[in-house]
Amino acid sequence: MGKFDQYKVELRGMTAPTASLELDIDNDFFAKIDGPEVQKGRANVKINVTKKTGVYVLDFDINGHVIVTCDRCLDEMEQPIAANGSLSVKLGDDFGEDGDTVIVPERDGYINVAWYIYEFIALAIPLKHVHAPGKCNREMMDKLRKHTPREDDGDMEGSGETDPRWDALKDIMDN
Ligand SMILES: [Zn+2]
């Protein structure tokens, strides 16, 4: 068995106009994919396949969480993920693309969706992710704060939303 054999979705052999399957992915999946955005997580993936004239439409419904780095304290945190995605697939001579439609070889008759699942999840991670208030790693926060030069209060931006203490940290991380 190949690393991603369980993520093959049979198309050519579909006997009914629709098919559905369900997969559970975990840390093992992310380790094998080895993508840049996510290394750990757990999710349930539901896929509905609809056979239309000459094209198969795959709808993904993904629910779970990924482990990402908190923007504030740099510690790991669980980020809930609810992602939806759609993919149009055609059978053809070879792998390719036709606009937004993916082409897979008819001789194979399936599409491997492992990378698409990964991409839908990666896209669903909010740009900003921080622990719930009070849940940050205090030790780490103290360390970060010690290495932060004190800033002149007059320099602060007037955003009422962020705690001014975080602004200095943000500057470190933006560099
Ligand atoms: Zn945190």
Image (cartoon, rainbow, N blue to C red):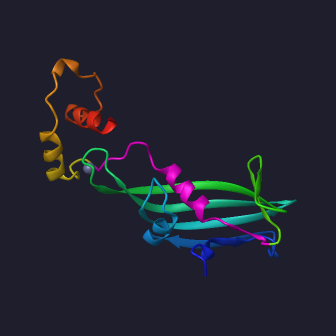
Residue that lies at the very extreme toward the right in this rendered image? 53
The answer to whether residue 3 is magenta is: no
Q: At which x and y percent is residue 64?
A: 46, 63
At x 67%, y 55%, the residue is 86
At x 28%, y 27%, the residue is 160
Q: Depth check: give the residue in front, 32 or 137.
A: 32
Q: Is residue 55 above or below residue 132?
A: below
Quadrant position of the C terminus in the picture = top left
Relative side of 153 to 103, left or right:
left
Q: At which x and y percent is residue 163?
A: 23, 34
Residue 93 is drawn in which quadrant?
A: bottom right
Quadrant position of the N terminus in the picture = bottom right
Relative side of 45 to 16, left or right:
left
Residue 110 is drawn in which quadrant?
A: bottom right
Magenta stretch: give its range: 108-132
Q: At which x and y percent is residue 155?
A: 22, 19
The answer to whether residue 131 is magenta is: yes
